Image: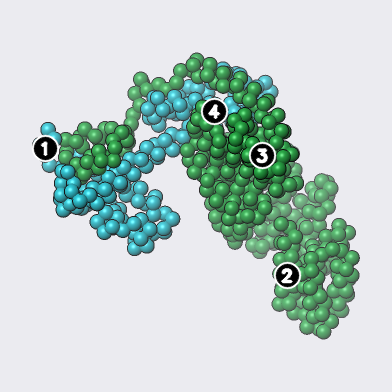
């Protein structure tokens, strides 16, 4: 039985799931959500579909669109919490009077070296933030960015820095082996 | 990387990584959310059978809840607003998703007749949605409901001309939807309200951007007829933002998508708008070609008022093309028609256009007769005082032979302003 808005007989829950489940699952796999989170997302989506089936013109297109948006939101949220952790950690480390494993000068130098690995406009922004104690709004003014857009740019630059922090390619250091 | 460390722990990790430890980097890189994640065949979310059981159970519960919700909303329908809010915040029986949905439906139904009730019910829906607990529904679906309630509140505020309040409510709605299910219908609903509010605020370029997003959302949902309807508004926003070319292009696209049989009025409206856009863009011949096909359709539909508006535009085009006889005929027909319909302001605006034409022809006696005739009409109809004052200025200028094109434009502007105020 094909699910569409033109059907006169309303499809049962079973019909809807059997029709739409395989493609929905394939969409989730494409976005690589962890299985336990993917279960929740799948269930939420079908619950919403059932609550709103009178409003949905094309259930298959709606499910694909909803899952796609939900997966993107999921990964953006995960990324944002990681970036927040990185940002806060660097700020705290720089502010801390005695770092347990490094002194302040070493940390500053290490940060400068890490900043060298990222695009220059990000380098300028993060340099202002970490090494010149500039808040995002001031940094926006100094760099000529719109204040309303600075947090998005900051996120992108933090992402670049974070990628740089986990990338390979430096000299061997036996300290952790 | 999984977010399990405390702040001190996170700080140590980041500092350590800043110190270039390649061993740690080799270990952490695959787990990074930045690394591409290829799902393995074992990552198979969901079991269809279990999902069906859970959904069927949920559906049975929801249907019962809907029936109860109708009664609960009826119970508070005639109470004072303060009492409604007190009840829903303190009484658990009101705190269900179906009550939110029923309140929102009732709020929506009131939007033309009773703006205050529209806002009051939206406020109650917000209060109920904020009181929902995690056990009621999955968190993402509760977020959607809250987003929807705040969006409805924003729209209700827009209807009451509180555009700043509307903007704040839309911002709250956005925060909730960002934590929601990703349902494009909720996103589309919010975008639709925002675009309307931006247009009401004269922020047409921003309205264009939001409306374009709305069109994309519905296109992805495969809803072509809705896309056609949205394009009509998009064309209007382009036009009001000064981009006549885009307005014309989008209106033409809308004409192609709308089904004249299922919605003849909308199909006519978009072509009517297209005539206006073409006229304003100086493409008079094309405007006349579209107009010629529209007139009989309006007549068939019995839509006298829009037919008069079209005839008026016909007059404006003929005026620009210097076809004096055709312009005069059209202005007379439209003007008399508006008077018959007791649409005094529209009659005055047509009279001004006719006055301009006669002025250009140096037919000052004709202008005097026109001024007197319109003044007589104004005295018999209820028109705003600003419009009366503007017309009195026009009459005085005619009497002392001081009528100029600039004065005609000034009077036209005054009339436009008073039309704008009466339209809200």
Q: Looking at this view, is B286 or A11 the one in front?
A: A11
Q: Looking at this view, is B148 or B289 the one in front?
A: B148
For this view, does B416 lie left or right of residue B50?
right
- Foreground mark, 2 or 4, reads 4
Residue that badge 3 annotates = B84
Letter of the chain that mark 2 sits on in the rendering: B
Q: Secondary structure at mark 2?
A: helix
Instruction: Please rate how many residues cluster around mark 1, counting C-alpha atoms within 10 Å: few if below 14, some from 14 to 19, many from 20.
Output: few
Q: Judge whether A44 appears above or below B116 on screen.
A: above
Question: Which residue is at 11% across, 37% downward?
Answer: A175
Are tags 2 and 4 found on a single chain? yes
Question: Which residue is at 79% across, 73% downward?
Answer: B389
Q: Position of residue B18 (x, y in %)?
A: 20, 45
Label 4 to label 1: alpha-carbon separation: 52 Å
Quadrant location, the N terminus of chain B: top left
Residue that badge 4 annotates = B136
Instruction: Please rate how many residues cluster around mark 3, counting C-alpha atoms within 10 Å: few if below 14, some from 14 to 19, many from 20.
Output: many
Residue that badge 1 annotates = A175
Q: Secondary structure at mark 3?
A: helix
Label 1 to label 3: alpha-carbon separation: 66 Å
Q: Judge whether A19 appears above or below B141 on screen.
A: above
Residue B120's image quarter? top right
- Foreground mark, 1 or 3, reads 3
For this view, does B59 lie left or right of residue B6?
right
């Amino acid at each position: 039985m094909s699910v569409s808005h033109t059907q006169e007989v309303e499809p049962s829950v079973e019909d809807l799931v059997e029709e739409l489940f395989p493609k929905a699952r394939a969409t989730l796999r494409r976005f690589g959500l962890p299985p336990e989170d993917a279960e929740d997302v799948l269930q939420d989506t079908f619950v919403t579909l059932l609550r709103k089936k009178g409003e949905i013109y094309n259930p298959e297109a709606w499910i694909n669109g909803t899952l796609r948006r939900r997966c993107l939101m999921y990964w953006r949220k995960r990324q944002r919490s990681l970036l927040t952790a990185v940002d806060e950690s660097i700020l705290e480390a720089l502010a801390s009077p005695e770092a347990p494993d490094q002194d302040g000068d070493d940390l500053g130098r290490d940060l400068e070296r890490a900043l060298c690995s990222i695009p220059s406009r990000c380098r300028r922004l993060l340099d202002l933030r970490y090494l010149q104690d500039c808040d995002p709004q001031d940094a926006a003014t100094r760099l000529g960015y719109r204040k309303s857009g600075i947090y998005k740019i900051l996120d992108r630059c933090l992402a670049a820095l974070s990628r740089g922090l986990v990338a390979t390619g430096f000299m061997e250091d036996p300290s952790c082996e | 990387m999984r977010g399990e460390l405390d702040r001190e722990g996170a700080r140590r990790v980041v500092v350590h990584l800043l110190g270039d430890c390649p061993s740690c980097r080799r270990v952490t890189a695959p787990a990074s959310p930045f690394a591409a994640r290829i799902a393995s065949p074992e990552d198979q979310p969901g079991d269809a059978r279990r999902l069906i059981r859970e959904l069927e159970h949920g559906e049975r519960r929801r249907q019962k809840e809907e029936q109860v919700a109708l009664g609960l909303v009826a119970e508070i329908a005639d109470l004072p607003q303060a009492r409604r809010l007190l009840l829903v915040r303190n009484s658990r029986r009101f705190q269900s998703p179906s009550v939110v949905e029923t309140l929102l439906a009732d709020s929506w139904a009131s939007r033309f007749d009773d703006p205050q009730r529209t806002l009051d019910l939206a406020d109650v829906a917000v209060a109920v949605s904020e009181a929902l607990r995690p056990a009621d529904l999955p968190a993402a679906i509760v977020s959607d409901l809250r987003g929807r309630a705040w969006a409805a509140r924003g729209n209700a505020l827009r209807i009451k001309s509180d555009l700043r309040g509307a903007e704040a409510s839309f911002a709250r709605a956005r925060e909730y939807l960002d934590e929601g299910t990703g349902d494009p219908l909720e996103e589309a609903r919010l975008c639709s309200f925002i675009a309307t509010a931006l247009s009401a605020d004269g922020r047409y370029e921003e309205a264009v951007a939001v409306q374009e997003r709305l069109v994309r959302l519905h296109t992805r949902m495969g809803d072509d007829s809705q896309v056609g309807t949205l394009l009509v508004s998009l064309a209007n926003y382009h036009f009001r933002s000064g981009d006549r070319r885009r307005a014309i292009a989008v209106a033409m696209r809308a004409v192609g998508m709308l089904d004249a049989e299922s919605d003849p009025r909308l199909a006519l409206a978009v072509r009517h708008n297209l005539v206006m856009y073409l006229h304003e863009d100086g493409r008079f011949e094309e405007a006349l070609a579209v107009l010629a096909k529209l007139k009989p359709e309006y007549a068939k539909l019995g839509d006298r008022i829009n037919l008069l508006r079209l005839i008026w535009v016909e007059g404006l085009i003929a005026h620009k093309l210097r076809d004096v006889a055709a312009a005069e005929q059209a202005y007379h027909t439209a003007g008399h028609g508006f008077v018959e319909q007791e649409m005094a302001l529209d009659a005055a605006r047509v009279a001004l256009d006719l006055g301009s034409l006669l002025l250009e022809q140096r037919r000052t006696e004709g202008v005097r007769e026109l001024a007197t005739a319109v003044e007589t009409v104004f005295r018999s109809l209820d028109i705003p005082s600003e419009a009366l004052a503007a017309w009195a200025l026009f009459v005085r200028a005619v009497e002392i032979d001081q009528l100029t094109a600039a004065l005609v434009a000034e009077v036209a502007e005054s009339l436009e302003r008073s039309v704008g105020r009466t339209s809200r």
